[in-house]
Amino acid sequence: MSAATPPLHLRSSTGRARRRRLVGRGMELLATLASVLAVALLAIVVASVIKEGAPALSWDFFTKAPAPFGQTNGGIANSIVGTALMTAMATAMALPAGVLIAIYNVEFAPPRVAEMVRLVLNVLAGVPTIVIGIFVYGLLVVGSGQSAAAASVALAILMLPLIARATEEVLALVPASLREAGLALGGTRARTVVRIILPTAVGGIVTSAIVAVARAAGETAPVLFTSSIVANLVSTDVHSALGSIPLSIYVNSESPSVHDQQQAWAAALVLLVFVLVLSIGGRLLSLRTRRQIERMR
């Protein structure tokens, strides 16, 4: 063997390192292509909705109730009001419960109990929305009729695991030194949580609520079972069925009227902008909260 030829084990090691580099670069390229594909799909969806829905937007679209079939001067004011009321009621139910669950899991629960609660929340988050809609239909609608209140219960069930898990992650980021300082000053565990931990994590809690609201506002399946038999007028009576933007999109898209189909596109654009704004705002607020907490460490 020539003196310039490296030993066999060194050549084998060099070959393995070269293969690992090639595999790593290949996987990096695949990951980049997948990310570009995801962004491209979002851009195509947004562009399509803007192209089809923007021409139908007008002041009447936001301020008037749906017009009778064949007329073209209506809007989705009833759906906007209904979505706002149902989402607000759902948030009022899900936010306190989700925050309390997260506080218990992080601050008070034994490890085994905390793991069990997390498992239950993960399973609940994965339950199909149509199943939740059927459950609430059988629980509250049968015998009582459809109502916005029943729809808000279904949406609250959807929001609960999102708020609880996101809040739990934020509370876990709070430095242990803050808890120790509160206890060292003579505060009880509960007082420390209320006076120190929650104010520190309030940005993350708001972020979790924003993300949950963005998801609930676009859900259709629970609303179909709980609040779909509606009159074409603006109402705030939560004990009766109210319209919603997802329901308006579904109904108008099935209509043979070209005007109704344009209204469906416009409603989809309104909902898309609402979800995008909430999602981006929630993400920015989350990053800000994480930076603030990191500076405390």
Image: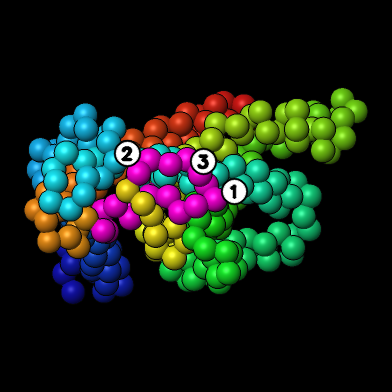
Image quarter of the N terminus = bottom left
Secondary structure state at the residue bearing disc 1: helix
Closest to the camera, between mark 1 and mark 3, is 3
Image quarter of the C terminus = top right
- Mark 3 and mark 2: span between their CA atoms? 17 Å
* Near-viewer residue (211 or 7): 211
Tell me which residue sits at (45%, 54%) in the image.
241
Q: Which residue is mark 3?
A: 88
In the rendered image, residue 12, in percent from the top left (x then y), is placed at 27, 72
Q: Earlier in the sequence, mark 2 or mark 1?
A: 2
Quadrant of res 161: bottom right
In the rendered image, residue 84, in percent from the top left (x then y), is placed at 44, 40
Does residue 136 appear in the picture of this structure? no
Q: Which residue is mark 2?
A: 77
Q: Which residues are magenta?
A: 233-251
On screen, residue 26 above or below 277: below
The amino acid pointed to by label 3 is Ala
In the rendered image, residue 72, in percent from the top left (x then y), is placed at 13, 43
Q: Which residue is mark 1?
A: 94
Quadrant of res 4: bottom left
- Mark 1 and mark 3: span between their CA atoms? 10 Å
